[in-house]
Image (spheres, rainbow, N blue to C red):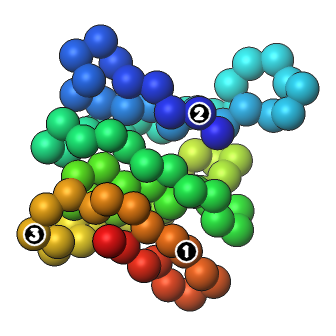
Amino acid sequence: MMVTNDDDCSEATISCRLLYGGGDEGTITIKRFMEQPVIVRPAANSVIFSCGNQIGRVSIPEMELIFQTDSEHNGAILDFAISETCIFTT
C-alpha cells in the first residue's frame, strides 16, 4: 500500500501493488478533509483510512470503497487502531 497526494493536496491516492510486481494493482482516490494527512492501516482483505474526521474502509485488491463516514469527532482523528470487529480512534 502506498498513499500519495496530488499537487494541491486536495486528494490522496491509495495504491495497491503486488510485492515484486510491476506497477499498480489498483488505486482509489480519497478527498482530503480539513487539509489533514491520510492515515492508512492494514486489515483483513482491506485497509482502513482516516483523514480529518472521516474514516473509511477500502477492499483489497479490488480497491472498492466499502464505507466512508464522519466519525463525529470534534476535530481530526489523530490515530486509530483496529481489531476484528472495531475501530478505535483518538
Left or right: residue 40 compared with residue 19: left
Q: Amino acid under label 3?
A: Asn
Question: Would residue 68 be visible to someone looking at this image?
Answer: no
Residue annotated with mark 3: 74
- Residue 61, relative to residue 70: is it above or below? above
Question: Would residue 5 be visible to someone looking at this image?
Answer: yes
The image quadrant that residue 75 belongs to is bottom left
Residue 87 % position (x, y): 46, 78
Mark-to-mark CA distance, 2 and 1: 19 Å
Q: Amino acid under label 1?
A: Ile
Q: Amino acid under label 2?
A: Met
Question: Mark 3 or mark 2: which comes first in sequence?
Answer: 2
Left or right: residue 27 compared with residue 16: left
Q: Quadrant of the C terminus?
A: bottom left
* Residue under the point 29% across and 12% down: 7
Q: Check if mark 2's residue and mark 1's residue have beta carbons within 8 Å.
A: no
Mark-to-mark CA distance, 3 and 2: 28 Å
Question: Mark 2 or mark 1: which comes first in sequence?
Answer: 2
Residue annotated with mark 1: 82
Left or right: residue 14 compared with residue 72: right
So how many labels did they put on this image? 3
Query: Residue 2's mark?
Result: 2
Q: Check if mark 3's residue and mark 2's residue have beta carbons within 8 Å.
A: no
* Mark 3, secondary structure of its residue: loop
